[in-house]
Each structure stands twice: as C-alpha cells, then as structure tokens.
Amino acid sequence: MVTKEMKPEKFIGAQLRLKLTDLRVLDGVLTVVDPFGNLLLTNVFEISEDRLDSKNLHKRELGLVSVPRDTITNVLVDRKTHKTLLGS
C-alpha cells in the first residue's frame, strides 16, 4: 500500500470539519497553519451536544478560531476537495 504524505498547506481555502477532544465539531475554512501545526479557521460554526440532554445539538457562529493541534481528533473534507487534492 502506498501512503501519500499530505501537507496541511494544501488544504488552505478548503472547508474543513474538525472533531475535537471535548466532542465539539467545528466547521470552517482553513486560513493558516502555523509552524506548530495549529489551525486558524474562518467562518466557523461550532456544533456541540447539550450536556444535560445529548439528543439536543447546539450550533453557534464563532467566526475566526485558532484550533490547537493537540485538541484535534479528526479532520474531514468535502468530496470535491478530497477529489481535487487526492485525485480519487
């Protein structure tokens, strides 16, 4: 199996969905990757579960957000971005 190394800079301008260690989900556009791997997203919306009732989700607009690398558990991209960057 051949593994392609993906540089985070290739995703600048892409719509990302980040899952965080505290179970929140952030949707936004990747703007900057700093030298330490932290991400800066714009046009961010946060989705989180209600702590008292996990069936209820809260969505709020955050705008510009800096996301520390060590809080990210999963990064998802849309199909169009995936196809453009990975060619599959």
Image: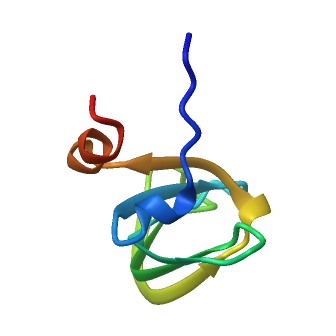
What colour scheme governs how the chains and residues are painted in the rendered image of this protein?
A: rainbow
The quadrant of the picture occupied by the C terminus is: top left
Question: Could you tell me if residue 29 is visible in this image?
Answer: yes
Residue at screen point 55% across, 17% down: 2
Residue drawn at point x = 35 percent, y = 37 percent? 86
Residue 28 or 58: which is nearer the viewer?
28
Compare residues 2 and 50 and report the one nearer the observer.
2
Residue 19 falls left or right of residue 26:
right
Image x and y of residue 16, in percent: 41, 60
- Residue 78 is left or right of residue 65, and the answer is left
Q: Is residue 68 above or below residue 3?
A: below
Q: Please indicate whether residue 6 sits to the left or right of residue 86 in the image.
A: right
Q: Is residue 86 above or below residue 43?
A: above
- Picture layout, residue 67 above or below residue 86: below
Residue 67 rendering spot, x and y as whole percentages: 65, 74
The residue positioned 54% from the left and 50% from the top of the image is 54
Image position, residue 24 (x, y; %): 58, 61
Can residue 49 be seen here? no
Q: Is 75 or 85 nearer to us in this picture?
A: 85
Q: Residue at x 32, y 42 (%)?
A: 82
Give the mark count: 0
Quarter of the figure with the N terminus: top right
Residue furthest top in the image: 1
Outermost residue to the left: 80
In the picture shown, does residue 22 fall above or below 78? below
